[in-house]
Image: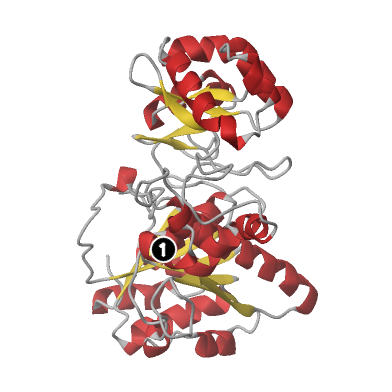
Amino acid sequence: MREMNPAMDADAAPLSKAGPLAGMTVVEMAGLGPVPLAGLMLSEMGADVVRIERINTDRAFLQLPDDFNLDRHGRSILRLDLKHPHGTELVLRLVEKADVLVEGFRPGVMERLGLGPDNALARNPALVYGRMTGFGQDGPLAGRAGHDITYLALSGVLHAIGAKGQKPLPPLNLVADYAGGTMMLVTGVLAALLQRAKSGKGQVIDAAMVEGASMLAAPIHAFMAAGLWNETRGDNLLDSGAPFYDTYETGDARHIAVGCLEPHFFAEFARLLPLDARFVGGQYDKELWPQMRAEIAAKVRQKTRDQWAEIFDATDACVAPVLSLAEARRHPHNVARQAFVKAGRLDRPAPSPRFSRSPTFAAAPPDERAPAPSVILARLGIAESEAEALVKSGIVGQ
C-alpha cells in the first residue's frame, strides 16, 4: 500500500502541489456528497482548493473525525459567517483570484447569499462556476430535497437494478451522487477550463444528478430502442437476467462474479467449471437459460470462493471472487498497482486517474499545523492585518 504524497511530511499539510491542475485555485462551498468528492479530486489533481464552511453548522449524521473525513482532506479550510455582509464580500474577493467555484446548494441559495453567478462573474468574468443539484437549476422539482436514491428513482435507472421478481436495489449512493453528480461536475469544470483557455471567458455549469444518472444509462436506452432490452428487471443481458452475467454462491457461503459474455470467454468458463457442452453451443438461447443457471449454481456450490478463484486465475473466463472492501485492499493486483494508499490513519483508494507527466497524490487530513485563517487569506491576496481583524471580529472562524 502506498504511503502519503512524498511532497508531504508524514502528518502535515502539503509542502507543494503537483498534478495537472497545479496553479489552479478552486473555491469549494462546503456541503454533502458529490461536491466534496469533486473538491477532493480537484485537490488531488493539483488545484489549491479553499473550502468555505459556515461558522455555525452541525451535520446531523455521518460525523467523522478529520482523519476519516475526506470532505476536508487536501483543502485550506476557512470558516466564515456567511450571514454577515463582510463574510460574503470576503468570498467574492476570493472569487476574484479563483479559477473555479463549486457549490451544491438548492437553487437560489447562493443568490440569496449574494454569491450567485451574476455577482461572482461580475467580479471575475473568467470564473468557472460549477453548480450541483439533484434536479437542476429550474423545472418543477428544482427546489425539492432528495438524495441519491431519489434521483436514481426519477432517472429510471433504479427500476432497472435488482433481481428478477425482487424490488429495485439501490447501488449504495454511487450512481446518482458520485457518478452522475461528482463525475459530471468534474467533467464540466475541466471542459469549461479548456474552453476558457480559448475564449478567456468563464461560464456556469448546471450539473443535475438525475440527468447525470440518466446519461450514464444512455447505452441502455439505445439497447431498448433496438429491441435488445426490456423493462422487466432481471430479464436482460447485464442485469442478472443472463446466467453467464451474474453472481453465484459458493460452498463457503461467499460468492463469485461470472461475466463471460463473449462466446470464446464462455467456452473457457464452461471448460473449467465444467458445464455441459450443449450450453456452449446455445449460450444465447434464452430457452436454455433456466437449466444453464441451475447447473452453474449447482457446480459453483461444490467449491469455496477461493478455490474457484484459483481455478479461474490466469484465464479469460471473466470470473472473479466477490471481495469485501477490506479484501480488495489486499488483492495482489491492487497491491502491485498500489491502488490503495495510507493517508494518516485512513486506508483509501488512490487518486484516479493516473497521469504520465503530472503525478497526483493522496490528500492529507487537516491537523493542528494547518495554516491559520489569516495565512490562508494572505496567500489569496487579503492583507494579513485585515485577515487578522476579520478573525478577531468573528466573521472568520478560528
- Please report the residue visible at 32 percent of the width from the left and 44 percent of the height from the top: 68
**Given the image, on which type of amino acid does mark 1 rest?**
Ala
State whether residue 349 is above or below residue 324.
Answer: below
State whether residue 204 is above or below residue 188.
Answer: below
- Please report the residue visible at 57 percent of the width from the left and 70 percent of the height from the top: 100
Q: Can I make out residue 380 in this image?
A: no
- Please report the residue visible at 40 percent of the width from the left and 18 percent of the height from the top: 250
Give whichever of 221, 34 is nearer the camera. Answer: 221
Say whether residue 169 is left or right of residue 357: left
* Quadrant for the C terminus in the image: bottom left
State whether residue 198 is above or below residue 217.
Answer: below
Is label 1 in a helix, a strand or a loop?
Answer: helix
- Residue receiving disc 1: 153
Image coordinates for residue 393, horizontal then vertical, percent: 25, 79
Give whichever of 78, 125 is nearer the camera. Answer: 125
Image coordinates for residue 125, horizontal then vertical, percent: 64, 84
**Residue 202 sits in which quadrant?**
bottom right
- Please report the residue visible at 66 percent of the width from the left and 56 percent of the height from the top: 227
Say whether residue 371 is left or right of residue 283: left
Q: Can I make out residue 392 in this image?
A: yes
